Structure formats: structure tokens, C-alpha cells
Image (cartoon, rainbow, N blue to C red):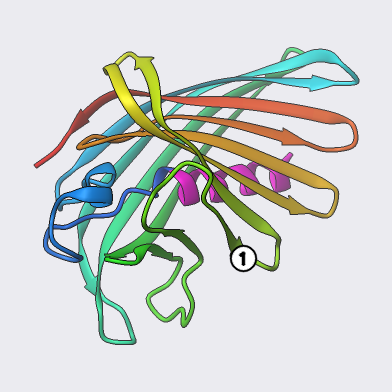
Amino acid sequence: MKKIYSVVIFLVAVTVSSCGSSDPIGPSSGGDSEYYPLSVGNVWMYDRSGSIASGGVQVGTVSGEIKLEITGTATHSEGFDVYVQEYSISDTTVINSQTFISDSTYTEYMRITDDGMYGYSNLTDTDSSFTVPFPLQAGATWTFSEEPPTTGEILSMSVAVTVMAGSFDNCMEMRTVWTDSGMVLTNTADFAKNVGNVRNEFVLTTATMIMTITNSLETYYLN
């Protein structure tokens, strides 16, 4: 379970943090950058709910929340500026009547240019840990990384999504697929203009288990 949680936390950061910016780091406002409204002080709160199945039988549930906050800016070792994104993830997992409580934190460094959005796990990374290339258009595909293999695809630019935070039309829907050592994690994420990520659905599959977790936007504050 510990390894699986680490995988999920990493992919949460990769996808939820797919929210780039035009203020003040990045290209001029408008266009694709409207799906990624980053500014220092922005906060997003997500509800987490899910289930765990083994051999086709449900054996557990997951509930919790994520707080995503843009806490400041920093300078990368290669000289460009990035946004500092901090995540607080709290989960309660019940498996066969046993309860496990997990609290995790994660920091990611974000940069957006006219060519796309880039994320870095550390300020000294020479290559971005993931990329979402512009322009955003249905059918576009790309590779996040070769090792472990992680691919991305824009499924649609016109999805309607309703969550606790409201109803959002014309959302961009992006799917990423991550594979490693027999594990496959598929994430489908929806982004609304001038809001950012409004919903993610993670499906983690191993030889014996399927874990599904949905993150839904509850509240948000944008500067």
C-alpha cells in the first residue's frame, strides 16, 4: 500500500498542478493559459472519494481532501522563474474494516511559456518532470517521460463538468497514462478556463487490485 500511495501522490501532483500562468511568469494572458490561472495566493480545495477492489470484489474505500496553494515564486538553477505550488493531501482509507490515515505534502515548481506548461520536482532539475504542450487541441498526444513511460492526450475541448464548486462548460479534458512494474495509472482530468483543474479521476490497476479515486473541486480562491 505504501508504494501505491506514493504513486498516487506523484500523479496527483503531476495532474492537479497542470495549472500554468501568465502572472507574472509566462506568456501574455489569454488563449491556452486561461486554463491554468496561477497567481501567488491562489488556493484550490478538492474532495477525494474512491474505492479499492480486489479480484472484482470491493474491499475498501478512500475519503479525504487536497489543498493546493500557490505560495510564492522562486528562481530555477538555470535562471528562469517558477511558481511554487504546495499540496496537502489527507486520506482516510478503510480496507477490510481496518482504517489507515495518511497525511502527505508535496511541492512542485511550475513554469509556463508560449510553447506549454512545465513542471519541476526540484529547482535544480535540468529537464521538466512533465510537460503539457500548446496549443491545446482535441486529439493532441505527447510523451511526459520515457522512464517510467507516461503519455498524455487531449480528449476534448468541450466537456461539461458539475462539481460542488459549480458547473463549468467547455472544459478541456486531458488523459495521462503512467506504467511501471505491472502498475498502470490512468488519470482523466478536466480544466475550466479561468478556474483550472475542476475534476480528476484516477484508476490504478495492478494484477490483483483496482483503486479508483475522484478529486472534485469544492472551493477555490483566485487573485
Looking at the picture, tell me which residue is in the foreground, 199 or 132. Answer: 132
Q: Residue at x 38, y 46 (%)?
A: 87
Q: Is residue 138 above or below residue 167?
A: below
User: Magenta-highlighted stretch: main secondary structure?
Assistant: helix
In the displayed structure, does residue 184 sit left or right of residue 162?
A: right
Question: Dot 1, how many residues are within 10 Å of its Cα: few (below 14), some (14-19), or many (20+)?
Answer: some
Left or right: 17 in relation to 195: right
Q: Residue at x 22, y 30 (%)?
A: 220
Pinpoint residue 67: horizontal percent, then vertical percent: 34, 36
Give the extent of the magenta segment. Answer: 1-15
Residue 6 is a magenta residue: yes
Residue at 46% of width from left, 78% of height from top? 125
For label 1, the residue is 145
Q: Nearer the viewer, residue 49 or 151?
A: 151
| Secondary element at tag 1 | strand
What x and y, as percent, mark residue 122? 43, 72
**Residue 170 is covered by the magenta coloring:** no
